[in-house]
Image (cartoon, rainbow, N blue to C red):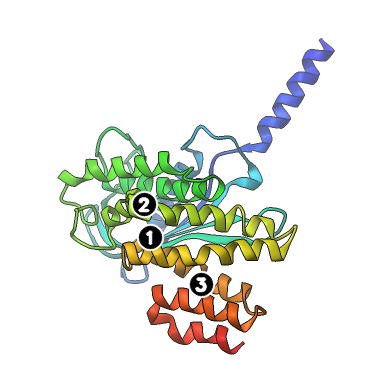
Amino acid sequence: MRIFCIISILFFSLHLTMAQELDCRIQVNTDNIEGTNKDIYTEFGNRLTEFINSQKWTDAIFLNEERINCNFVVTISSVSGDNYSGSLQIQANRPVYNSSYTTTLFNFKDENFNFNYAQADRLEFNENSYDSNLMSVMAFYVNVILGINFDSYSRLGGTKYFEKAEAIAALAQSSEDLGWKAFQSDKNRYALISNYRDERLRKLREVSYEYHRLGLDEMAQSADKGRNKIFENLPYLQEVNREKPFSVALQLFMEAKMNEILDMFRDATSEEKKKVYDVMISILPTQSQKLKELLNS
């Protein structure tokens, strides 16, 4: 009996340390809407947050401190009955091993977010059918975030989740909802997941693993070793850009990492700074002023 109690306590304690994959917060911005009941939007955000955080999205075991921190900001620009339209900002971070530092994994603004919602609606997602644009969009970005996160821990480890996001986009093709159509935009959901599934961008996903797992995660043990690994991989990003110029996935990666890389190489040699600058300016030409700060630091 005593052994059984001890085992039960240990199991219960272990269970308490386990967690769902995401630590997500959803905010609803209604600044552009007048004369509406704001409590409805607060409830809407809370219900979506609870749905995403309570859902089991993977078969992996996450400790509480390993949960993926992410933020969704729904900005509503117009309302007609139960029909809403606006935009959705998605941002996700990843902890760096043996440090209190977190690094940005994904930061994207979806400009075409329209959905139907009533307070009595049940929030459910069926991966085998397209029932709700709201839930399909949420599940789509959850799987994109998971794909990017798992890629950062193991080489091409996020493939399963990119495939799930691709399947969601495929089911949505028959709908009239914005953001899903093939070739309608080079920055919509279809274009985004097509990038992550494109074999020509395989190297970007491999660089993400090297950058995070063999670079940032090593810096607590050896800053030079981690920084050198990142430096070695930067030229591969130029190769990706030549293969598929200005792809949305590459742009998002570089924009997310720009300030981090600039800080990392601020004390590097002039030659190293020049190489870093050449790589980054070829991919982010509109950031020339910001990138020149590296050369002058």
Side of 183 relative to 282 (left or right): left
C-alpha distance separating marks 2 and 1: 7 Å
Query: Image height check: is 266 above or below 55?
Result: below
In the rendered structure, which amino acid carries the disc numbered 2? Tyr
Of helix, strand and loop, which one carries label 2? helix
Q: Position of residue 130 (x, y in %)?
A: 24, 39
**Of pointers 2 and 1, the one earlier in the residue sequence:** 2
In the rendered structure, which amino acid carries the disc numbered 1? Ala
Contact (Cβ within 8 Å) of mark 1 with mark 3: no
C-alpha distance separating marks 1 and 3: 14 Å
In the rendered structure, which amino acid carries the disc numbered 3? Met
Q: Position of residue 165 (x, y in %)?
A: 34, 44
Identify the residue position indicated by label 1 in the image. 249
Contact (Cβ within 8 Å) of mark 2 with mark 3: no
Residue 196, disc? 2
Identify the residue position indicated by label 3 in the image. 258
